[in-house]
Amino acid sequence: MYILLLLRWLALCVMVAVAGCAQRNSCREIISTPHAPAAIGPYSQAVRCGNLLFLAGQLPIDPQTDQLMATGTIEEQTALVIENLRAVLEAGGMTLADVVSTQVFMQDLDEFPRMNAVYGTFFAENPPARATVEVARLPRDVKIEIAAIAAR
C-alpha cells in the first residue's frame, strides 16, 4: 500500500514537473521581423514570455538598406531607433502604446534634451517608465540605443 502511494506521489511530481517545463517553454517565443535590423550577434530581436515582450536594444540602422546612420543627429538616430522598436513590437502583435519600460543608452547625455524631445513625440500619452544612462561606447559607435519591455 505504501508503495502504491509512493508511486502515485511520484507520478504526480512528474506531471507537475512536465507542466512546469511546458509553461517555461511558452516563455521562449522568439519574435523576429525583416522590418527591423537583424540581430548582429547571438540574441533575438524580441522574446515573448506570457503577456510580456522583451525587446533587444535597437540601433539606428535602416532595415531597408542595412545601413547604419552613423553621422545622423541625435534626433534622427532616436527617431530611427524608435521606428525599429515599433517594427519589432508590431511583429509581436503590440504597439508603442504597450511599452511599459525603456532603457535608453546614450553616448553623450548633453544631447539628452534633444533626444527627449523626439522620444516624447512617440510616447506622448502614458509614457513608459524609463532609465537613461550615458555609456562610454555603443555598438558601431552610434549615439543611442534603446531597449524596451511591452505588456498586454
Image (tube, grey):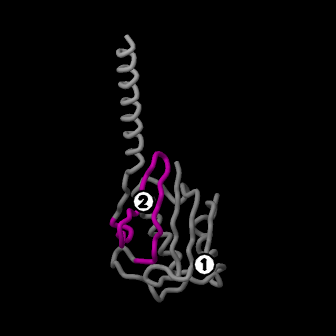
Q: In the orientation shown, which residue stands out farthest toward the front?
A: 2
Q: Count neighbours of disc 1 (C-alpha within 10 A) and say few if under 14, some if 14 to 19, many if 20 or more.
A: some
Badge number at residue 134:
1
- Residue 151, percent from left and from top: 53, 51
Question: Which marked residue is nearer to the observer: mark 1 or mark 2?
Answer: 1
Up the image or down, 73 lies above or below 24; here it is: below
Residue in the image at 42% along x and 56% along y: 47
- Between residue 131 and residue 72, name the one nearer to us: 131
Q: Count neighbours of disc 2 (C-alpha within 10 A) and say few if under 14, some if 14 to 19, many if 20 or more.
A: many
Give the side of residue 15 with respect to residue 102, left or right.
left
Give the side of residue 128 with respect to residue 65, left or right.
right
Residue in the image at 36% along x and 35% along y: 18
Identify the amino acid type marked 2: Ala
Residue in the image at 37% along x and 51% along y: 29
How far apart are the two marked residues, 1 and 2, measured between alpha carbons? 23 Å
State the extent of the magenta-drawn residues as a range. Answer: 34-61
Q: Which residue is mark 2?
A: 46
Up the image or down, 62 lies above or below 22; here it is: below
- Residue 122, percent from left and from top: 57, 67
Badge number at residue 107:
none
